[in-house]
Amino acid sequence: MRIWIAAARDAGLGTGGWAVVRDGAEPAGWAGGERRTTRPRMALAAFVAALKDVASGEALSVVAPEADARVLHALLKPPATPPLDDLDLRALLAKALAGRTWKLAVGDPAGATPVAFAAAWADLARDKARSGGAFAATIPKANLAKVKGL
């Protein structure tokens, strides 16, 4: 299964957003956001959302912009000193990824690709969280149908 993840954060206001696009049997996508958050937390939240209903034995191919890929890389190859932030999300991901085969790649959000689509939705989610607070929503299938490379 291919998964594209992107996160966004407004440094001035502290609001953040995330988006995920998944190409399994049928394309699917979700976006969400929070107030007073970090970009790493948003990248982790996106990955949690991406895995919520994926069969435990299914291999994954994850693509994310460089900043988000760095956060996710610590899940793939844990550093000598484990991160101390966002332990709630990291615990959920450790459980979901246990025994699972997955690979991670850096995607360019500047091209017409699924990672660019996810980045645009992460920006929208960040802006929505600014006015409405924490949320998660499904990306409409009509929007997903227009994604090049999906």
Image: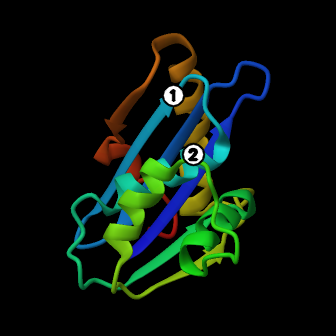
Residue 31 image-quadrant placement: top left
- Label 2 crowd (10 A; few <14 / some 14-19 / many >=20): many
Label 1 CA crowd tier, 10 Å (few <14, some 14–19, many 20+): many
Quadrant containing the C terminus is bottom left
Q: Sequence-wise, which precedes: disc 2 or disc 1?
A: 1
> Residue 121 shows which numbered tag?
none
Question: Vertically, is 3 above or below 12?
Answer: below
**Residue 53 rendering spot, x and y as whole percentages:** 21, 62
Residue 117 seen in this snapshot: no
Residue at disc 1, secondary structure: strand
Residue in the foreground of this view, choosing between 30 and 53: 53
Count every numbered label the image shows and give the total. 2
Question: Is label 2 in a helix, a strand or a loop?
Answer: helix
Residue 97 position by quadrant = bottom left
Q: Is residue 105 left or right of residue 99?
A: right
Compute the Cα span from label 2 to label 1.
10 Å
* Amino acid residing under circle 2: Arg
Question: Badges 2 and 1: C-beta atoms under 8 Å apart?
Answer: yes
Residue 125 lies left or right of residue 143; in this view the side is right
The kind of residue tagged 1 is: Glu
Quarter of the figure with the N terminus: bottom left
Which residue does the image show at 51% across and 73% down from the upper left? Answer: 62
Provide the residue designation for mark 1: 34
Q: Which residue is mark 2?
A: 41
